[in-house]
Image: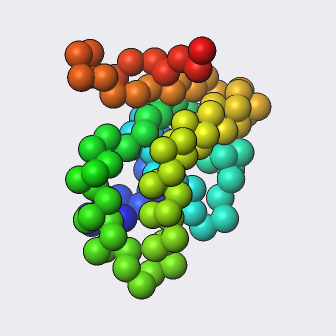
Amino acid sequence: IEPGAPPIEGRLKALRALADEGFATYANIMPAYPLTGGFSPDDVARAFRDAGVRHVSAGAWRYLDGVLPVLERRLAGTRLEPVLESVRDPGYFARMLRSLERAFARAGVPFTNVYPTPERGAAPMRWD
């Protein structure tokens, strides 16, 4: 969705190359976009594991009110337009991040949910 961003496959390939050279690699999925293209949380977790990533953190979209109008214009008439309905659901990101958390646990990759707070930046998300 972001113009000029490197493709995900290229990013994973770069992480794998760094891990193969002995570098400890970490990934931050923030903002976490809704899963599309038939990919499941388990697919995402396995991709990071297979890329040699040692830890992943992820967080929901910030500034959703400002992002949605831009995405509505950009995604209008595309196969991704229905994704916007998902993100308008107030509980969507918590459910998605929780499903990623479980998938990463199954894949054996440490995972931290983070959320933005005005006072401290990003902080670990607690479910209690």
Give the residue at the far bottom of this rendering: 77
Judging depth in this view, the residue of 123 and 2 nearest the camera is 123
The answer to which image quadrant residue 77 occupies is bottom left
Image height of 54 relative to 85, above or below? above
The relative height of residue 4 versus residue 53 in the rendered view (above or below) is: below
Q: Nearer the viewer, residue 11 or 80?
A: 80
Q: How many marks?
A: 0
Q: Is residue 60 visible?
A: yes
Residue 75's image quarter?
bottom left
Q: Is residue 7 above or below residue 13?
A: below
Q: Residue at x 47, y 34 (%)?
A: 58
Percent coordinates x, y for residue 11 in the rendering = 43, 50
The colour scheme of the drawn protein is rainbow
Q: Which image quarter is the N terminus in? A: bottom left
* 66 to the left or right of 124: left
User: Where residue 19 appears, x then y in whole percent?
Assistant: 52, 33
| Residue drawn at 57 percent across, 63 percent down | 36
Would you place residue 99 above or below residue 108 in this image? below
* Residue 100 x, y percent position in the rendering: 62, 38
**Residue 55 visible here:** no
x and y, in percent, of residue 17 in the image: 49, 42
**Residue shown at 57%/56% (left/top)?**
35
Quadrant holding the C terminus: top right
In percent of the image, x 51 and y 71: which residue is there? 82
